[in-house]
Amino acid sequence: MDFGLTDEQQLLLESLDELLERECPESYIADLDLHHQPPTSFRKAMHEAGFMSLGFPEEYGGTPVDAITLVLLAARTARQGLNNGYGLELLQAMDIIEFGSDEQKAEVLGLLSSGDVPFALGFTEPGAGSDNSAMTTSAVHHDGLVTFNGTKTLITNALQSKYLLLMAKDPAVEDPRKAISMYLVPMDAPGVTTNRLDKIVWHISDSCEIFLDDVTLPESCLVGVKGNGFKQLMRNFEMERLVIASQCLGLAECAFEDAASYAAQRVQFGRPIGEFQLIQQKLTDMAIKVENMRNFVFRTAWMLDQHVPLKSQGALCKRYCAMAAFEVADEAMQIFGGVGVTVGTRVSRLWRDIRGHRFGGGTDEIMVHIAGRQIVKDHS
Amino acid sequence: MNAAQSWIVVADDAAATGLVEVARTLGTEVVAVVAGRRAVAEAVAGVVDRVLWLGEPGTAPVEAFAPDVARLVAEAAPRAVVGATTPGGRALLGAVGAALRSPVLAGVERVELAGDDVVVTRSVLGGISQHRTAVAGGPAVLAVDAGAAVAVSDTAAAVEEVAATPLPAQVVEVRPTTVAGVDLGAARVVVGVGRGLKAREDVALISGLAGALGGEVACSRPLAEGVDWLPKDRYIGISGQRVSPELYVAVGISGQLQHMVGVREAKVIVAVNSDKAAPVFAQCDYGIVGDLYQVVPALTAALGGTA
Amino acid sequence: MKIVVAYKWAPNPQDADVAADGSVDLGRAKWAVSEYDPVALELARQLADATGGEVIGLTVGAAGIDTPLARKAALSRGLDRLVLVADDALDGADGTRVAAVLAAAVRGIGDVDVVLAGDSSVDVAAGQVALTLAGTLGWLGLAAVSAVRVADAGTAGLVVERELPAGTAVVSVPTPVVLAATADAVVPRVAGMKDILAAAKKPVEVLSLAELSVAEPGAVLTTLATAKPGGAERTARIFDGSDAAAAATELVGALRQSGAL
């Protein structure tokens, strides 16, 4: 089994290191977090260096790379302390490359390739999250047009995005599995309004309620096949879970490094607290969790690259990494003591941001729901 | 080889006391070859035994005279050739080294003679180690700090003009520097801060102390390149700046060699660190073991500044 | 225009372990294109793009500098091709010998207009090799170059800007010429995946040291002793900072008494 990096991966990581050092220092991230701003200039620099089109097929101007490479880059960016800084663009591109019309591909890939955020995913509703059968946002097709009504909530990056990738239901279709379709709705279409939600995590990503009030667009805004919306969306969930897990890994590595350095320097009772075994046990268990996450994430990526069916591997990985990363961040904060909760100490931000990953992209509990079913099925 | 002679190569700058000092140690007769204005040659003539001057350079950069300098030195084959570490000095030494097929030794800290061999104590690998090196079989070519300017003296040697054929190049314009970057090298007092500092805002605390001491703020590598709390031109260390102030105060700096090589020439080093086992305490003249957040304001106050 | 970038594949002594006797263990040090050389690579690429020229990387050293990773690391930074001399006879070679080998390779490449180099290497850090290379070739060598462009139409050569203590000097230079850049002359671009993949396909020429006619050294260096520098002669007087005000007063008193203040 080869745990080494290829020359290409190593050089790409060195390039990323250079960019992070230059364009994404801690002061920059802390400032974004404080002022609740997205990392626009960093994204632009990443785009200019060609990172934003990694994984896209060549015919769309991209450079194909394997999942392991993408996961390495996503985890490295997160290790800088930047949450959701890299890795999700590919998912957005793949949704559209696979199912979009030529016009939709040109538009979305064009936005991606100029470093913009093309769309936010409009899925969650006040009454429907993972239970998509409870979705109420309606899409009524008529005269070559389609009219949307409903409310979406907790939509990440809505204010930065040009479009909403809207999941909506045809009220005339009984079977909930065949009722949901996917649409690309301009955020500035008449009848679309937003309300930013204040939250205690993920300050650099906005979260919004989105109200759709008789929003009427040409039917060409449909993405893929009518009624196949949920199936289409599901296609990328495994990859999304892996990207989230790699974020968790990187953020946890960052928290661990901060805590270990602090323990080696902070002197109490005449010696660095890292010399006390109670602190050493914390650091040891944190290191084990980080190592487990790393192995889990890279093996899952390897399975994707080898076309081994993931089944519930993505859900297992996402659940483990979100929970373990938060345990690492929580212990890191404990090692810092009171300093750890002060604004401006990086570990406090990591603790907040990792906490968000325990529900973003599906809760810890939904991951049990997905994996548990699969495990029982495999043994029946 | 003419073992009695040592030569200095002067690149249009009367700052040459450092060159002469090294050359005097290595030869009974010191010969200077000056690429540059006559005034520089005349000043140098006061401190050496013989001056060869390559004529008025006009618009030619001093580097254009490198082949002439190399030719003169190679013909004389002295025991040692000493030049400055400035861009012009290194260009002249490069040509000399090439002509003599002799390495140009930099980081020179001390020179001595062992029989006919020149023995050089020099820092290597950016200063993390020190070597005592004997140069045998050919002239020693040394790059040293130029030192202070020499003034014109009454008992000067004659300036002998030597015909030169400079390479064709022309300085067409010189725009005086306007940027107000920090000049740590010129500061009498430098206060360096390291990872002991917990937050960017706390740099103000260090600035307060530097202000009370009339000095500049500097930092170790992580603060300039890791967290970016201070600009890179304030970073002291192996790949950053080297300073030699009267007083260096290391605050929250553990004392890794990679940082300390940058302050080794400081006259007095003070360390403030909460870890009494920090290596910095073995490399300082005065130390306070304590929390910098207590000690720095107290020091600022004791100096009459506002914490 | 034919541009050679003389760069170094070097270990970063930031990660070196130095023993008490001054011996240096670079085992943990990471090897890379030396810290300031990407600046020269970027300047060369920009100059070549402005003139339709070619950029050739050139590096010399011990056999270990020729690895697929080392080749790609350089070739992904804007080079068109690479020439290298990798021979263990060059392990620990002094700067003048390195310059002599570089010069022989530059002559071998032929018709070179400009050699560009970084400010100094990350390990030796003397800023000397590029200028000794100029001396070996008999060309003009200028350090502290912050910008370089082709001379205006009708005039031959290049116009370079140099950051010198007196200010910015603008120098009109003929070719061939050797230029060593300042550390911050330009911000080098980072290599993207396309550049890294393309690097594997670019031509690499390995020159044999034996076939280059490099003169034997005129002086021989012998290392008599090594030592860990500094520190030893300083005798620390330590104050207990648990009472910060008292310690501060004592220290300031001691500094005043010694004349440091």
Image (cartoon, rainbow, N blue to C red):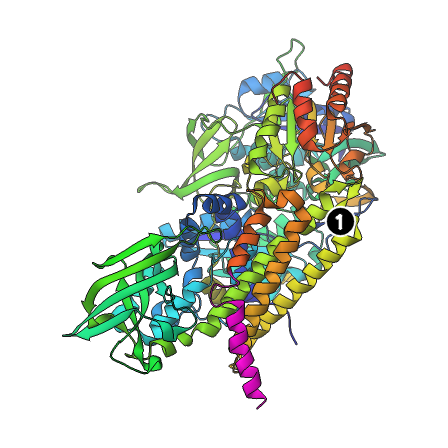
On what subunit does the disc labeled 1 rest? Answer: A
The residue where tag 1 is placed is A274
Residue A350, above or below B53: below
Residue A72 falls in image quadrant: bottom right
Let me know if residue A359 is in the magenta part: yes
Residue C189, above or below B35: below
Q: Quadrant of the N terminus of chain A?
A: bottom right
Residue B98 falls in image quadrant: top right
Q: Position of residue A172 (x, y in %)?
A: 24, 79
Locate residue C115 relative to residue B152 in the image: left or right: left
Q: Residues within 10 Å of mark 1 (few under 14, many from 20)?
A: many
Residue at image coords 64%, 34%: B193
Locate residue B300 relative to residue A148 in the image: left or right: right
Q: Which residues are magenta?
A: A357-380
Residue A377, above or below B128: below
Q: Position of residue B203 (x, y in %)?
A: 58, 32
